[in-house]
Image: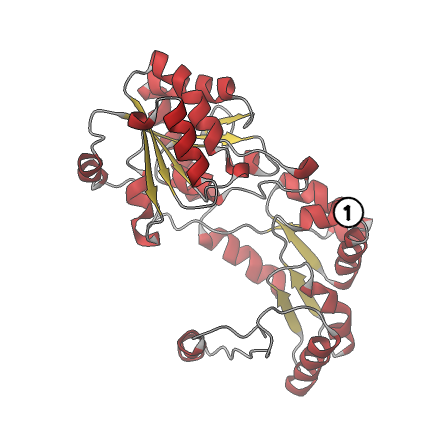
Amino acid sequence: YTSSQKDSEPFDRAWSENYGVEVIRDKSTILLPSFRVGRAVRRIARERQITRAFFGAAAPLALLAQGLRRAGVTRIVALTHGHEVWWAKLWPFSLAIHRIGAGTDHLTYLGNYTKSEISRALSQSAQDAMVKIAPGIDTNHFAPQSSSAALRDELGLTHKKVIVSVGRLVHRKGQDTLIEALPEILMHIPDAHLLFIGEGPYKDYLVKRAAELQLSHAVTFIGRIQYADLPRYICVGDIFAMPSRSRLAGLEVEGLGIVYLEASACGLAVIGGKSGGAPDAVLEAETGFSVDGTSPHEVADAAITLLQDPVLASGMGSRGRQWIIDEWQWDVWSNRFSALLN
């Protein structure tokens, strides 16, 4: 049961034909736990004798959980992301998180940080029932790419030490700190180059700031690319960096940082920010470094350390890829989720 979206018919048909799943769409384009929606899902649960329910986003939709119990649903699991962290911190949203925990059998969490923050709003029994379920990484798709050498040539970066950064260009992702760190990096690594992949409202400022620092020659903005091409672009980098930082007194944080895991899967050493759950996606001094995303010097120091020692960077990249294969593949999480729901 989900919201109405434009041109969703092919998607719905594919789920039906390939997996035998019926997609029922509410008339609203944004699904909220309203009285009308609650009545609709309870009716469906009763009519079809549904006993298991899964909420793809706990807040706010899992507020419907207790109503589903009354309709005969006996097993309820709700997935949390990053936004539940600020819900858990602010009244009255924290009351909603408490109610969601009371109404479900299990709340999932992305990593240690999100678990610790969300659990503050939960009863002890709901805390004890939390289970780690994170997005999986396709290690066949995100893998070292031999074709990236040709792409380096196309981009004019053949003889550069490339720091690649993938993400939406917004203040929280820390791309500005990378630019501010670049003068110090260039003092030690004269052929260093920043490669930004992504779009966002912060781009104009970043372009302007690079020009002000006379760094335009050492910074390239690629813009948005297709998902299929992402590993190839990541592998253009010698290392990966996205020094994210928290905003709004800790209410806006990195929930996990899937892009760090994708970069590790591609065999790159990673520089991440100490924001929220981002450190859960980096094994400190094993797959990369977590730094203060507000400190150009810390970012520069980590980048210089890795770019001056290709053996160290390569070893961290290899360790990172093996870590993703061992602990972050889709099969790991899908098997855990299946056991949880059943």
In this view, the residue in front, 219 or 55, is: 219
Instruction: Bin the neighbour count of mark 1 within 10 Å (Cα to Cα): few under 14, some 14-19, many 20 and up.
Output: few
Quadrant occupied by the C terminus? bottom right
The quadrant in which residue 321 appears is top left
Q: Position of residue 208 (x, y in %)?
A: 41, 32
Quadrant occupied by the N terminus? bottom right
Q: Position of residue 74 (x, y in %)?
A: 72, 71
Scheme of image coloration? secondary structure
The quadrant in which residue 187 appears is top left
Q: Residue at x 43, y 40 (%)?
A: 203
Q: Count the marks.
A: 1
Is residue 99 rendered to the left or right of residue 18? Answer: right
In the rendered view, tell whether residue 258 sits above or below residue 242: below
Q: Which element is circle 1 on?
A: loop
Q: Position of residue 313 (x, y in %)?
A: 36, 24
Q: Residue at x 66, y 59 (%)?
A: 58
Q: Which residue is mark 1?
A: 90
Q: Residue at x 78, y 76 (%)?
A: 70
Q: Position of residue 144 (x, y in %)?
A: 29, 40
The quadrant in which residue 209 appears is top left
In this view, the residue in front, 81 or 92, is: 92
In the rendered view, tell whether residue 309 sits above or below residue 83: above
Q: Residue at x 78, y 57 (%)?
A: 96
Residue situated furthest top in the rendering: 187
Q: Amino acid at mark 1?
A: Leu
In the rendered view, tell whether residue 332 sits above or below residue 240: below
Residue situated furthest bottom in the rendering: 47
